[in-house]
Image (spheres, grey):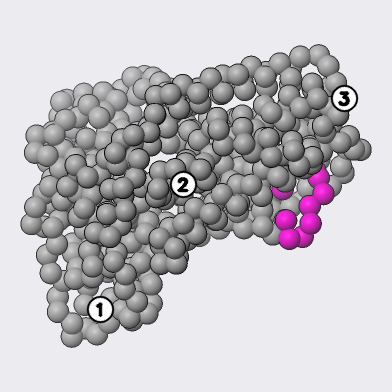
């Protein structure tokens, strides 16, 4: 966790406030509005009268969303619009970290969990020497994005955490009951934290099925199938519970963003479809005033007239665009399937190879909406950070990360494919781990390429696993004395 320590505070992303306020709103309502924090003020006056209090309370008052387009966000409580996909469960962990320690407890929790998973991973391959374990951890901290994501107030760190937990549970090896419980709870936390983690788990389960069917290389313990299937079920149930709770409180279902509509329009075929008449303008997005259509982020998130589209529409128009998202995307695909398929493939490749930090330097002081969305006291803490001063050597850190990843891929290819000690069961398990992880990354990249806009976070948050696997492969091949050799585990 050296990155947030040096920064002086946690790292924020545009979605961070949504996570924290989701949990803050839950605590506020469950406590009959007795519990309030600095985060509560932004939405308290916009709650429906029946939400957590007496129906005699005053009607919601207009917020900045209604009075100034510059401050519109995807969440407009006064209009009953709450964006789906922002988990209150991981938000609860951040919120507890905030009220107890100004977020430091959350950061320490993620760093501790990372160490626990790394230690169990090395132990699975017989690497238990304390000096070696410490060296591996220090190298991961120095060369990869791991400590950065441990310090970021997002669900992202649990993407890699969930992968390691699944790999440990789904391959043979001795684990204590406590370790099994903690690993399963890691998967549960991952899938209830973000939709993309459900996608990751689905990709790993699919690859595991292929390995079990077509390659007799390992026996999958029962706990692995339970973790995969149970994790997916819990993830989908959590989405339904969140939607039900939101509708119960706000009186309306969570707002669906027109992610695919924006993606397909930005890709080009969607723009052509609009220009061709949009099937008689039967979709809402055909009838609203549109701005810059070359970037999905501009379509969805920009509030400047002539540039943005979605946030400049009325609440009802936004809701309609979200409800028609799938239908619009299907219509675009049928209009030009070749061009859209090509765009999806290009976006998938871009996502899979997009490895960099990018979020280290985020100057919030010059962005007015930050101070509307973030409590004043938290904003003052942010002003003191290296991130706000844009003082991180992001280019040098990106270069170091990419060098480490390229070298790791070369090491993995040589150690796992070149002739050598291929009879060692640990080589076989590591190859399977790499295949399963790669399948998850490809499916995740496809999600980024076909559904949402490719983002620097989606693969960068996972890429430290590649460096970890490469170090394990190098130790097993070139320094076998550092790894204790045991008989192949049967369970």
In the drawing, what numbered circle is on residue 361?
A: none
Q: Residues within 10 Å of mark 1 (few under 14, many from 20)?
A: some
The CA distance from mark 2 to mark 3 is: 44 Å
Residue drawn at x 53%, y 36% is: 462
One can see residue 294 in this view: yes
Quarter of the rendering containing residue 250:
bottom left
In the image, 371 versus 188, the foreground residue is 371
Quarter of the rendering containing residue 300:
top left
Q: Nearer the viewer, mark 2 or mark 3?
A: 2
One can see residue 311 in this view: no
Q: Nearer the viewer, mark 1 or mark 2?
A: 2
Above or below, 92 relative to 366:
below
Q: How many marks?
A: 3
The CA distance from mark 1 to mark 3 is: 66 Å
Q: Which residue is mark 1?
A: 50
The CA distance from mark 1 to mark 2 is: 43 Å
Residue 194: x and y in percent read 46, 50
In the drawing, what numbered circle is on residue 5?
A: 2
As helix, strand or loop, the secondary structure at mark 2 comes to: helix
- Indicate left or right for 446 with 25 as reference: right
Q: Name the chief secondary structure element in magenta.
A: helix
In the drawing, what numbered circle is on residue 423?
A: 3
Residue drawn at x 76%, y 27% is: 475
First along the sequence among labels 1 and 2: 2
First along the sequence among labels 1 and 3: 1
Magenta span: 165-179
């Amino acid at each position: 966790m050296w990155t947030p320590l040096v920064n002086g505070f946690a790292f924020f992303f545009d979605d961070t406030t949504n996570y924290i306020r989701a949990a803050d709103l839950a605590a506020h309502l469950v406590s009959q509005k007795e519990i309030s924090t600095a985060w509560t003020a932004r939405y308290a006056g916009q709650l429906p009268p029946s939400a957590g209090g007496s129906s005699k309370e005053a009607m919601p008052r207009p917020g900045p969303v209604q009075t100034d387009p510059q401050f519109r966000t995807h969440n407009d409580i006064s209009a009953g619009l709450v964006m789906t996909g922002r988990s209150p469960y991981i938000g609860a962990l951040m919120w507890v970290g905030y009220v107890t320690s100004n977020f430091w407890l959350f950061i320490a929790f993620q760093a501790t969990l990372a160490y626990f998973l790394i230690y169990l991973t090395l132990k699975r391959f017989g690497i238990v020497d304390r000096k070696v374990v410490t060296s591996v951890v220090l190298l991961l901290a120095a060369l990869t994005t791991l400590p950065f994501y441990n310090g970021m107030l997002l669900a992202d760190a649990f993407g890699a955490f969930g992968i390691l937990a699944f790999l440990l549970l789904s391959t043979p090896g001795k684990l204590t009951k406590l370790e099994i419980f903690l690993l399963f709870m890691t998967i549960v936390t991952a899938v209830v934290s973000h939709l993309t983690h459900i996608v990751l788990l689905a990709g790993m389960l699919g690859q595991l099925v292929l390995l079990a069917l077509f390659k007799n290389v390992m026996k999958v313990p029962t706990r692995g199938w339970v973790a995969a299937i149970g994790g997916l079920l819990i993830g989908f149930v959590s989405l339904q519970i969140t939607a039900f709770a939101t509708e119960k409180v706000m009186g309306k279902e969570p707002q669906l963003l027109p992610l695919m509509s924006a993606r397909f329009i930005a890709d080009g075929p969607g723009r052509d479809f609009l220009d061709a008449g949009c099937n008689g303008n039967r979709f809402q997005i055909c009838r609203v005033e549109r701005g810059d259509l070359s970037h999905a982020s501009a379509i969805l998130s920009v509030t400047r007239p002539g540039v943005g589209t979605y946030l400049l529409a009325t609440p009802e128009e936004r809701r309609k665009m979200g409800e028609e998202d799938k239908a619009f995307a299907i219509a675009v695909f049928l209009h030009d399937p070749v061009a859209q398929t090509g765009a999806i493939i290009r976006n998938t490749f871009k996502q899979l190879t997009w490895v960099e930090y990018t979020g280290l330097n985020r100057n919030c002081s010059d962005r007015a909406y930050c101070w509307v969305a973030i409590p004043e006291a938290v904003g003052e803490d942010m002003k003191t950070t290296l991130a706000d001063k844009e003082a991180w050597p992001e280019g040098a850190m990106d270069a170091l990360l990419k060098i480490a990843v390229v070298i790791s891929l070369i090491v993995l290819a040589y150690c796992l494919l070149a002739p050598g000690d291929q009879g060692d069961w640990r080589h076989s398990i590591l190859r399977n781990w790499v295949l399963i992880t790669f399948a998850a990354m490809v499916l995740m990249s496809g999600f980024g390429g076909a559904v949402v806009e490719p983002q620097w976070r989606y693969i960068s948050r996972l890429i430290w696993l590649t460096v970890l696997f490469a170090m394990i492969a190098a130790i097993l091949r070139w320094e076998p004395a550092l790894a204790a050799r045991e008989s192949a585990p049967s369970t």
